[in-house]
Amino acid sequence: LNPSTLTVGQHSVTYEVISSGCVGTAASSITIDATPTIVLGTIPTAACSADQSIVLSATPNGGTWSGSGVNNNSFDPASASIGANNIIYTVNSGACNVSKDITKNPAPAFSGLPASVCLKTESLNLSNYVNIVGGTFSDNIGNVTASAFTPTKIGTSVISYTVSSGGCSGVKSASIVVNGLPTVSITPIGTLCNNDAPYQLSGSPQGGTWFG
């Protein structure tokens, strides 16, 4: 059945089966609606996660909006999926529709960043811990230079990441605690003879591990 070859209105179709010389038929009707001219209002092609709801509009009035992030006649970026969201406007009881994609750009986020590190350990490349690259890192106590976190100062580094992508701007913060190194000492041992009794080693603070 090719709807484009039929006129607007109701049409009947019949299905016939012949078996052992006997004929059976069934009939049904199909309604062909005129294809309306649907015009979408001004709808952006992209939205940011933190944007306010976008009012959707189209003509003719009276249709129904559907799709990810759609609530009645509004598109809510906060509830939409990251990436392309297909927004559909349907009229004539669902027979005809038109659609448009709105791309939701993600907000910046950290993932996998350690909660704490030791003083003077290896630098971390902070770009490996964010979902969007190309932003700017900073912190409050001076452990961040460009995208490198180098734990040279003890305390809690509150790291801020500011990024602009796809017309969206956002700031995300995360913290790393830089712990100081313990002050370790060994009680003087002196000279021992190879036939002396076992010697009890002593160090401060207690609870460490001896090796050598």
Image (cartoon, rainbow, N blue to C red):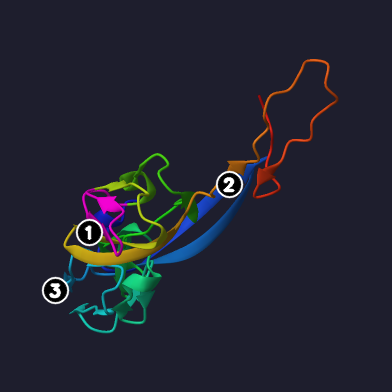
Residue closer to the observer: 15 or 120: 120
Q: What is the quadrant of residue 88 in the picture?
A: bottom left
Instruction: Give the side of residue 177 with respect to residue 3, left or right.
Output: right
Q: Is residue 37 visible?
A: no
**Image position, residue 87 (x, y; %):** 30, 66
Residue 163 disc label:
1
* C-alpha distance separating marks 1 and 3: 27 Å
Assess whether residue 117 is covered by the magenta stretch.
no
Residue closer to the observer: 206 or 56: 206
Q: Which residue is mark 3?
A: 42
Residue 17 disc label:
2
At label 2, the amino acid type is Val
At a point 49% along the width and 56% down the height, the residue shown is: 115
* Disc 1: CA contacts within 10 A as few (<14), some (14-19) or many (>=20): some
At label 1, the amino acid type is Val
* Disc 3: CA contacts within 10 A as few (<14), some (14-19) or many (>=20): few
Assess whether residue 138 is covered by the magenta stretch.
yes
Q: Nearer the viewer, mark 2 or mark 3?
A: 3
**Compared to 5, does 31 lie above or below?**
below
Residue closer to the observer: 204 or 195: 195
At a point 83% along the width and 21% down the height, the residue shown is: 196
Q: What is the quadrant of residue 195 in the picture?
A: top right
Q: What is the quadrant of residue 175 in the picture?
A: bottom left
Q: Earlier in the sequence, mark 2 or mark 3?
A: 2
